[in-house]
Image (cartoon, grey):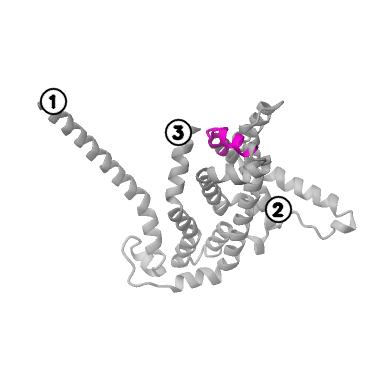
Amino acid sequence: MKRMKKNQSVIQWKNAFTRCILIAFTVIVLLPIVWTVYTSFKTSREFLQNPWVLPSGLHWQNYMNALEKGNMIAYFKNSVFVTILGLVFLMVLAVPTAYVTSRFKFRFSKAVSILFMSGLFVSQNYIVVPIFLSLNNLQRYLNQYVVFQHVQLTNNLIIMALIYAVCALPFTIYLLSGFLKSIPHEYENAAKIDGSSYVKTLIYVIIPMAKPAMITVLLFNFMGYWNEYIMATTLMQEEKWTLPVGLANLMEQQKFATDWGAMFAGMVIVMLPTMILYTLVQRKLTEGISMGGLKG
């Protein structure tokens, strides 16, 4: 009896210790976000006097200044367009590829899988310059023909969305393949008996079952596309910039007379869509990660 009470006491202490760690971790994560949000409502004078105290009022003009002076509305539209189109390209390319590499055995199938996995070791930052030079050379070649004289490969949001998708293929295929391998083959066999083709089986059987994994990779890649800076600043000119580049430009413009309220308002504008999306799909994201960890 005493041993049971002692064990219960140890478990209670462990639970309390775990909760304390989780609470401390939550505070560490949330504190910078909360500070950024309430600082975005301060005037520059309030920020310089004491950056940690609460603002005297809600100065919404900071957001208006960020949107107008920093041209954030145009950059926001560019970010939304590139991110959504990049995710569409990614799913169209990654889902069928992951399905084939994880569910079918064919000649050189292992080599194909290894080739895709090797892309995990290539950082996007290392290939920005080769991509830029390749696009310029290809555009110079295409411009020799009258039909392609007006084609722009750089400063083109569609091309950048396609590049985002291709760069994210190794990571996405890796995650999706791990999940798809866990789906029993009986579902495909039943669909085959009913006369379903491979394409129909993928669309009506595999994809509905893989929704948690797809939501997980969509959210991860959304954050990557939304916050991407190097590719956007290298390939795009000012009118085609995305939000991270626009925010950096706003900070550069205000180097000698910084409007701190507008700058923090710009930060909130950049991070708000990611926070909203994460809140909406949090349950599915957790489910996808846990299922991928257990089955992959």
> Is disc 3 placed on a helix, strand or loop?
helix
Q: Amino acid at mark 3?
A: Leu
Q: Of marks 1 and 3, which one's residue comes earlier in the chain?
A: 1
Q: CA distance from mark 1 to mark 3?
A: 34 Å
Side of 277 where 174 appears, left or right: right
Residue 246 bears which disc, if any? none
Residue 159: which disc? Answer: 2
Q: Residue at x 65, y 37 (%)?
A: 192
Q: Pointers 2 and 3 in contact (CB under 8 A)?
A: no
The amino acid type found where label 1 is placed reads Arg
Q: Which residues are magenta?
A: 176-192
How far across and how far down the image is residue 284, in percent?
A: 46, 48
Provide the residue designation for mark 3. Answer: 294
On screen, residue 214 above or below 82: above
Residue placed under numbered mark 1 in the picture: 3
Of all residues, the one furthest to the left in this rendering is 2
Q: Nearer the viewer, residue 245 or 218?
A: 218
Q: Main secondary structure of the magenta part?
A: helix
Q: Earlier in the sequence, mark 2 or mark 1?
A: 1
Q: Position of residue 147 (x, y in %)?
A: 87, 58
Front-most of 73 and 287?
287
Rendered image quadrant of residue 8: top left
Q: CA distance from mark 2 to mark 1?
A: 67 Å
Q: Residues within 10 Å of mark 1 (few under 14, many from 20)?
A: few
